[in-house]
């Protein structure tokens, strides 16, 4: 790394994702220091400052005005991602923003443009690209382990965010359309949308989707105002076609699997609890890879996101999940919402992000 001075980081939004992922991973990084905290719940910010060191700020603006802080993690509700990211970039900070990038395509585009203008890092928390089995699977695909990929199915589902949120239960902000804007599609679907582009080295150019609310209830007993299930048929630029399913109604067991079907065999990723990758040849032969276990809400492991963010910031380079790259995955998300609303297939434009 070019710099030996630790990257001094501010945390904006001190909820669950900050507490179980960002703060512990910064503290364990060795090249970063958590210097500041802001949360609308001031006592929460003060509690973290007392526990881990650093200062609790009275506002996000006050934190961003501190010239001693070089980077921030944006860990607030979805609707505030764009506003705070843009303020941070204009204040000269590197930014790691949680997913989904923002709640409109215009906001996502503005965030990427502001990062370019500021000459600062904008990284989005698409941690599935860093899961060791996904990195290995991409390598195996590129080496032709299953020939040419023809189709795929990729799933991400669990019982819902109400047990995960810092304020658990049916009143969770995840269910509030004003704060979350989108549901399972943006919470989980964006991960698999981004992942399939990464694994196949090809962008999604067309989507046919059903984005619906089937079961989740809010505190009043009514169906929540955001989607709890999304099922999309994606066509890739290279001709591959497959399905992506995101769900908050997989009660009993999480599914975070991806299966690729190729001309010479099948690759199953995080489909078997014992082996992270299974490659099945045309002749029925099996090659098993015991690499790691996928993260779940109940079993948090090091994501790789924080280490990459700190390294990219200190080395003065773009990250592996730069905002301009994630922009195309967000185009596919918004196109899927449009497809579901209109009941038609949507072609995705945008060219190079």
Image (tube, helix red, strand yellow):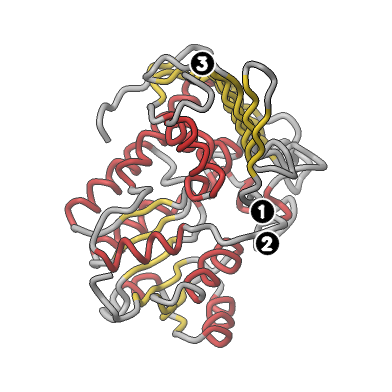
Q: Which of 187 and 272 is in front in this view?
A: 272
Say whether residue 81 is left or right of residue 114. right
Tell me what residue is drawn at x 75 percent, y 48 percent: 219
Q: Is residue 209 above or below residue 139?
A: above
Q: Where is residue 22 in the image (x, y as percent from the top left)?
A: 51, 66
Sooner in the amino-acid sequence: mark 2 or mark 3: 3
Tell me what residue is drawn at x 55 percent, y 87 percent: 50
Q: Quadrant of residue 83?
A: bottom left
The C terminus lies in quadrant: top left
- Neighbor class of circle 2 (other Cα within 10 Å; few <14, some 14-19, many 20+) is some
- Residue wearing tag 1: 172
Q: Mark 2 and mark 3: span between their CA atoms?
A: 43 Å
Q: In this view, which residue lies farthest toward the top?
A: 344
Q: Position of residue 322 (x, y in %)?
A: 33, 48
Tell me what residue is drawn at x 29 percent, y 68 percent: 314
Q: Mark 2 and mark 1: span between their CA atoms?
A: 6 Å
Residue 115: mark in rendering: none
Q: In which quarter of the image is residue 12?
A: bottom left
Indicate which label's residue lies in the foreground, 1 or 3. 3
Answer yes or no: do the residues labelled 2 and 1 have beta carbons within 8 Å? Answer: yes
Query: Is residue 245 in sight in this rendering?
Result: no
Answer yes or no: do the residues labelled 2 and 3 have beta carbons within 8 Å? Answer: no
- Residue wearing tag 2: 167
Mark 1 residue element: loop
Query: Is residue 313 in sight in this rendering?
Result: yes
Answer yes or no: do the residues labelled 1 and 3 have beta carbons within 8 Å? Answer: no
Mark 2 residue element: loop
Q: Where is residue 67 in the image (x, y as percent from the top left)?
A: 26, 79
Residue 150: mark in rendering: 3
Sooner in the amino-acid sequence: mark 1 or mark 3: 3
């Amino acid at each position: 790394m070019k710099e030996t001075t630790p990257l001094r980081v501010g945390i904006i939004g001190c909820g669950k994702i900050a507490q179980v992922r960002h703060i512990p991973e910064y503290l364990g990084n060795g090249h970063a220091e958590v210097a500041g905290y802001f949360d609308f719940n001031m006592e929460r910010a003060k509690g973290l400052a007392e526990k881990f060191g650093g200062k609790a700020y009275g506002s996000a603006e006050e934190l961003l005005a501190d010239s001693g802080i070089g980077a921030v993690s944006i860990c607030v509700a979805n609707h505030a991602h764009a506003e705070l990211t843009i303020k941070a970039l204009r204040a000269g900070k590197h930014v790691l923003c949680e997913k989904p990038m923002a709640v409109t395509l215009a906001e996502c585009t503005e965030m990427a443009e502001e990062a370019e203008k500021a000459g600062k890092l904008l990284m989005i928390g698409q941690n599935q690209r860093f899961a060791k089995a996904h990195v290995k699977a991409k390598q195996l695909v590129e080496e032709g382990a299953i020939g040419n990929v023809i189709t795929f199915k990729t799933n991400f589902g669990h019982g819902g965010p109400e047990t995960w949120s810092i304020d658990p239960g049916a009143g969770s902000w995840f269910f509030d359309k004003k704060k979350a804007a989108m549901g399972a599609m943006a919470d989980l679907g964006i991960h698999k949308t981004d992942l399939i582009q990464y694994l196949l080295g090809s962008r999604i150019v067309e989507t046919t989707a059903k984005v619906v609310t089937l079961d989740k209830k809010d505190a009043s007993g009514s169906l929540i105002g955001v989607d709890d299930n999304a099922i999309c048929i994606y066509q890739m630029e290279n001709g591959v076609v497959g399905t992506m399913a995101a769900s908050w109604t997989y009660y009993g067991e999480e599914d975070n699997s991806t299966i690729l079907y190729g001309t010479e065999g099948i690759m199953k990723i995080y489909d078997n609890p014992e082996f992270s990758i299974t490659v099945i040849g045309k002749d029925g032969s099996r090659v098993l890879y015991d690499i790691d276990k996928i993260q779940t809400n109940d079993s948090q492991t090091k994501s790789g996101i924080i280490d990459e963010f700190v390294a990219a910031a200190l080395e003065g380079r773009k990250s592996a999940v730069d905002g301009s790259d994630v922009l195309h995955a967000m185009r596919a998300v918004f196109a899927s919402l449009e497809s579901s609303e209109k009941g038609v297939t949507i072609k995705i434009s945008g060219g190079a992000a």
